[in-house]
Amino acid sequence: MVEKMNSVSFIKELVFKIAEIGKRSQHINAPDLKNVEPFKHFFDKKGRLKPDELDTMDGAWTKREILTRYLLLNIVLDQGPDIPGVRELLKTVTNALYRKEIRIFHRPLDFFRELNISIDEILKKHDSIKTLRADIWAKQNNSNSSKYNLFFAQSQRGIVSINQVLDYGIHRWGVPLCVPLLLEKDLAGKIETRQPLVDYLESFSSAEVTSMRIKNHERYGLGSAVGNKGCHLFTKWYIHTFHLSSRKDVGWSEWSYEVPFDSNVGRVLFRTGYLLSLADLDYYQSWNVIQQKKNKPHYIRVTNIRGKKVQKDIDDEEIKKNYKDVLLNHLKTRKREPTTIEIQQMPNAILLNSKFGIGDFDDGLIYIGTNFCINDERPKCSKCPLNSICKGFNGNEFLITDYLT
Ligand code: SF4
């Protein structure tokens, strides 16, 4: 049985510690934009994005617009099984297409007009990445290297591998490229803009509202091409990682969007005892977050936490006051004062107005989840910077051994 899991001071200490680690981790796992050939001149000699030039033109659009288009495609592709491979695929296909003057972020129609070349390049680059990454991926995932495949589709069971490049190319590459294309066409002759996608994304009252519209907008939404986690990851990159946002109001602050909940986040928050500090195991089972298997380890499906409420008493006036501010002024997803707190939004209330934002917290979770708290029954606890406060490491070993993501 987990003891003293309802301590608010424990949750606060843990959240701040993770955010502090994240701030030092230098945007771990961010897309490598500086090595995408058409963007190289957007960066200085030290590889830093030149912020003063974001509003300057690069062809028909601002540099801010071009990078935003790339990141929108990146979050869709990121749902593939091997993130380093996915990122390499996007970068190398982009480079190859631009060398042939197929400028898919400057002229999205090029992707479809030269569809034979676009598809050929996706196939060719996929083959070379498979040669480089398949063995590493197979070892990390206890799988067979012959199963390495970055092409995927959404099914009722979640993301599944597919072999059809046209399905992958049109649905995963084509849909996010069509968002700026449709905006361009809709605005032509009506409104003059140098950054249609940026203007559209920043037209909503908050970053959180934007992240919802990226998926569910009736005309411009990506729909089944992206999940909620991808939309939040995009928002994090846009605000925190690359500082692309030109909105500076509270609706676009460092606390104005939810943490992108992925498997790294779920594993670290479960093992450290964070999740069980907010609700008992029974709740997570009834929400299908913890999926009981006949034989251990059980499965943690963290995406099912979305919208679920804290079930324990949060006896902390500062958190309650902050949460009201977060919900009404930063996330702007409610008009009435909240009576309960959503689990996924708790870090926003804890970190509000501190020197750490949601991006720092997420960076910390990724750093811990990929370097120490790996998806294995024997994570590297002895070297983990959270080991002094982690409940799994300090007497509740079942949190580590009995549950995986
Ligand atoms: S101490 Fe171990 S279980 Fe806890 S977060 Fe670190 S690696 Fe994970």
Image (cartoon, rainbow, N blue to C red):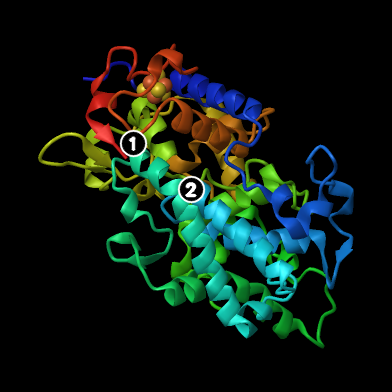
Q: Where is residue 312 drawn, in percent x and y? A: 35, 31
Which residue occupies the extreme left position in the image?
294
Disc on res. 132:
2
Q: Where is residue 90 drawn, in percent x and y? A: 58, 59
In the image, ligand 1 is in what quadrant? top left
| One can see residue 368 in this view | yes
Say left or right for 17 vs 284. right
User: Mark 1 vs ligand 1: CB under 8 Å?
Assistant: no
Relative vertical location of residue 129 with respect to residue 20 in this rendering, above or below: below
Relative vertical location of residue 4 with respect to residue 116 in this rendering, above or below: above
Q: Where is residue 281 drawn, in percent x and y? A: 24, 34
Relative vertical location of residue 378 with respect to residue 154 in this rendering, above or below: above
Say left or right for 4 vs 249. left
Precedes in sequence: disc 2 or disc 1: 2
Relative vertical location of residue 238 with respect to residue 139 in this rendering, above or below: below
8 vs 198, nearest the viewer: 198
